[in-house]
Image (cartoon, rainbow, N blue to C red):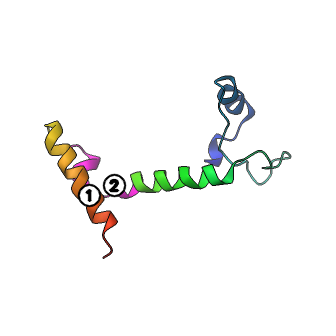
Amino acid sequence: DKGYDSEAIRNKVRERNSSPVIPRKQNSKTGNGDIDWCLYKYRHLVENAFARLKHFRAIATRYDKLKLQFESMLALACAMIWLPM
């Protein structure tokens, strides 16, 4: 996240009528007062979900050729992540 902390990227996001949800680096002179931390936490949860799904080799490499088989494997992986082990 912090690797994309530049004013040029932030301005492009603002031009598209959005708000940047990237925290600034520690050595930044501008603070993080304009960051919506709740939205950032949700964004982080979604990123973590995709990272956990990539642990399943069949999903990460897309071995299944048919859409139905891929969606079935995706549902199975989500169920396995959701269930407490």
Q: Nearer the viewer, residue 3 or 49?
A: 49
The residue depicted at 33 percent of the width and 65 percent of the height is: 82
> What SS does tag 2 mark?
helix
Task: Determine whether, in the image, residue 30 is placed left or right of residue 23.
Answer: right
Q: Nearer the viewer, residue 73 or 9?
A: 73
Farthest residue in the top direction?
A: 15
Task: Determine whether, in the image, residue 12 is placed left or right of residue 43.
Answer: right
The CA span between labels 1 and 2 is: 7 Å
* Disc 2 target residue: 53
Label ID, residue 77: 1
* Stretch in magenta: 51-64
Task: Determine whether, in the image, residue 63 is placed left or right of residue 77.
Answer: left
Q: Position of residue 46 (x, y in %)?
A: 47, 51
- Magenta-drawn stretch contains 45: no
Label ID, residue 41: none
Q: Position of residue 44 (x, y in %)?
A: 54, 54
Give the quadrant of the C terminus: bottom left
- Magenta-drawn stretch contains 59: yes
Quadrant for residue 67, please give it. Answer: top left
The answer to whether marks 1 and 2 mark residues whose Cβ atoms lie closer than 8 Å is yes
With respect to residue 56, does 84 lie above or below? below
Q: Position of residue 50 (x, y in %)?
A: 40, 51
Q: Position of residue 80 (x, y in %)?
A: 27, 64
